[in-house]
Image (tube, rainbow, N blue to C red):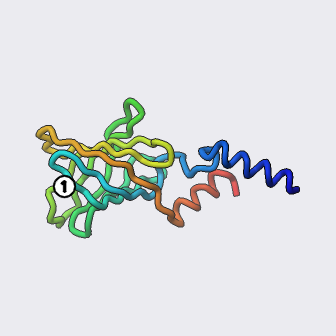
Amino acid sequence: MSAVLASGILLAILAPDAFSQGGPLTGNWTGSVSGSGVNRPVLRIVITDSETGGSWAVSTSCHGALKLKDISNGYHHYTELLASGVTCQGGGVDCLKLEGSGLYDLFQPVPSEGYLADGTLHRIASKHRGRDRRRHHGR
């Protein structure tokens, strides 16, 4: 048994990506996105199971829904829709792509006026995501 454990530890050291939390875009993500004319120090994105929508938030007064616009070049392009009653000028397009265990976000505000921002978001644990994994593996 110790030989099996030792080989498992060796495999984890040599191939850490085999044990990563990668996978579909579905789930809760957080991080920062910044660039020319845009600064979102704390961004939270939630992608639904079908990956056709979700939600985004930078604060309680600046948030809304995401709607899948299209998929191209490995990116899912989501249009940000502002929630009613918000006090920000948000809105734009989040172009999302998995990179390792992170979710790369290339953001273009609307109107764009040439501004772009980017950053990598990281998956945060949720009960919802755990149910997805169990259902996916037939448990």
Question: Residue at point 24% right, 53% down?
Answer: 81
* Residue 55 in the figure: left or right of residue 128: left
Q: Position of residue 60 (x, y in %)?
A: 25, 69
Q: Nearer the viewer, residue 5 or 57?
A: 5
Residue at the extreme right: 1
Vertical comparison of 27 with 116: above or below: below
Q: Amino acid at mark 1?
A: Gly
Q: Position of residue 67 (x, y in %)?
A: 32, 48
* Residue 59 in the figure: left or right of residue 12: left
> Mark 1, residues whose alpha carbon is within 10 Å: few (<14), some, or many (≥20)?
some
- Quadrant of the snapshot with the N terminus: bottom right
Question: Residue at point 18% right, 65% down?
Answer: 86
Vertical comparison of 126 with 71: above or below: below
Question: Residue at point 44% right, 53% down?
Answer: 48
Q: How many marks?
A: 1
Q: Nearer the viewer, residue 54 or 37?
A: 37
Pointer 1: what residue? 90
Q: Position of residue 110 (x, y in %)?
A: 16, 45
* Residue 5 in the figure: left or right of residue 42: right
Q: Nearer the viewer, residue 85 or 112?
A: 112
- Quadrant of the snapshot with the C terminus: bottom right
Q: Position of residue 37 (x, y in %)?
A: 15, 48
Question: Residue at point 39% right, 52% down?
Answer: 121
Vertical comparison of 50 with 139: above or below: above
